[in-house]
């Protein structure tokens, strides 16, 4: 009978209103066959007091203190004793109102047994709902924790690789070192300051991807053909933070960046369905991109399953000359 939605005064007021309505209905019913108004009032008051006692004692005392703690025998004995005492009190208060003693006790026990059963059923349903809510909250908490852990894995992995690239440029006194550091700072700003929630603006994520591509352009001595096309993106579109990063890293790190091609396409259709494709040439001597990427692809698969359950499709295609990723996400 506890309620976390309405305020305590309203909660108490509803209980009082319920018993007043119950008493009013009982009064109207008994008035049809009991002539004395004093006897009617006596019957109504005794019924309301004993029924409410049964209800609250069972719900707030017996069930939580005995049944919940596994003391089932004690609960059964206490329940029987409570009902018997309440019925005896009612009979003593109202007297033998019927010629049959058995029928008198039966009539006096009906409300007691009725409210005992009702409060027991309500208590079980309330606890079942509470248990389900707690399970959902625990699952959401576990998902949030796992997502944070996956992102903590992701950021150092990216930073380690990128700093290695910038270090090599600085070591060989590459003139592109300063622009590369500037691009890296912009990317780190996106990673740190845009990460205030699970989703970020898709436009900002695209800007991050463009900076990533430009950083690799500056680093590479060779000039592979790199294309990045995107369309259909609006300010209303949001995406999981850094969800494309692993695919970009794999394409540049494990692809043929000497004389190969890297094609990246991102498209959002009228139904807010996102289509992402990245295809890169590979060198035959290397292991497959999926084998080399290790933690990276496993990480992003877990994130997709956690953030977009039943709302995404990921397809990886490997052949001797190329590796392609096709990702579809429902953004609604």
Image: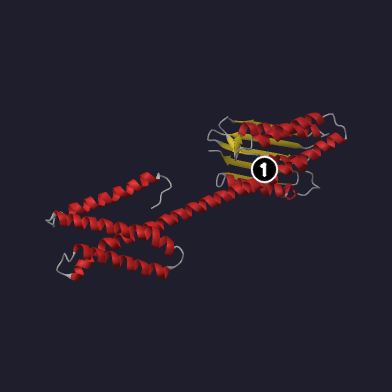
The one of 161 and 315 positioned closer to us in this rendering: 161
Left or right: 227 in relation to 201: right
Residue 110 place in picture, x, y as percent: 25, 63
Residue 324 place in picture, x, y as percent: 69, 42
Residue corresponding to mark 1: 325
| Within-10-Å neighbours for mark 1: few <14, some 14–19, many 20+ | some
Query: Quick one: SS at disc 1?
Result: strand
The residue located at (68%, 45%) in the rendering is 152
The residue located at (78%, 29%) in the rendering is 179
- The quadrant where residue 184 appears: top right
The one of 313 and 144 positioned closer to us in this rendering: 144
Residue 304 place in picture, x, y as percent: 61, 45
Left or right: 177 in relation to 278: right
Residue 154 place in picture, x, y as percent: 69, 44
- The quadrant where residue 199 appears: top right
* 166 over 5 or under it: above or below: above
The residue located at (79%, 31%) in the rendering is 218
Q: Is residue 107 visible?
A: no
The residue located at (44%, 68%) in the rendering is 71
* 233 over 82 or under it: above or below: above
Q: Is residue 22 visible?
A: yes
């Amino acid at each position: 009978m506890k309620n976390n939605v309405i305020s305590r005064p309203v909660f108490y007021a509803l209980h009082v209103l319920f018993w007043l309505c119950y008493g009013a209905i009982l009064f109207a019913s008994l008035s049809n066959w009991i002539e004395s108004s004093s006897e009617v009032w006596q019957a109504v008051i005794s019924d309301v007091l004993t029924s409410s006692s049964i209800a609250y004692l069972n719900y707030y005392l017996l069930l939580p203190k005995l049944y919940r703690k596994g003391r089932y025998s004690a609960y059964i004995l206490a329940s029987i004793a409570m009902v018997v005492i309440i019925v005896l009190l009612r009979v003593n208060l109202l007297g033998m109102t019927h010629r049959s003693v058995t029928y008198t006790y039966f009539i006096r026990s009906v409300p007691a047994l009725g409210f005992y059963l009702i409060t027991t059923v309500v208590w079980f349903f309330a606890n079942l709902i509470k248990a389900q809510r707690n399970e959902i909250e625990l699952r959401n908490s576990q998902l949030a924790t796992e997502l944070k852990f996956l992102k903590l894995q992701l950021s150092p992995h990216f930073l380690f690789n990128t700093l290695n690239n910038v270090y090599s440029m600085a070591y060989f006194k590459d003139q592109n070192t300063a622009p590369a550091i500037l691009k890296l700072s912009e990317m780190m700003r996106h990673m740190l300051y845009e990460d205030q929630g699970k989703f970020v603006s898709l436009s900002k994520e695209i800007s991050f991807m463009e900076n990533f591509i430009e950083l690799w352009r500056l680093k590479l001595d060779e000039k592979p053909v790199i294309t990045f096309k995107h369309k259909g993106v609006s300010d209303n579109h949001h995406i999981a933070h850094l969800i494309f990063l692993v695919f970009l890293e794999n394409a540049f790190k494990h692809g043929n960046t000497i004389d190969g091609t890297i094609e990246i396409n991102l498209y959002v259709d009228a139904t807010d369905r996102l289509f992402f494709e990245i295809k890169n040439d590979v060198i035959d001597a290397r292991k497959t991109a999926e084998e080399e990427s290790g933690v990276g692809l496993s990480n992003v698969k877990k994130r997709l399953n956690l953030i977009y359950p039943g709302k995404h499709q990921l397809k990886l295609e490997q052949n001797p000359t190329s590796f392609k990723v096709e990702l579809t996400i429902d953004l609604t």
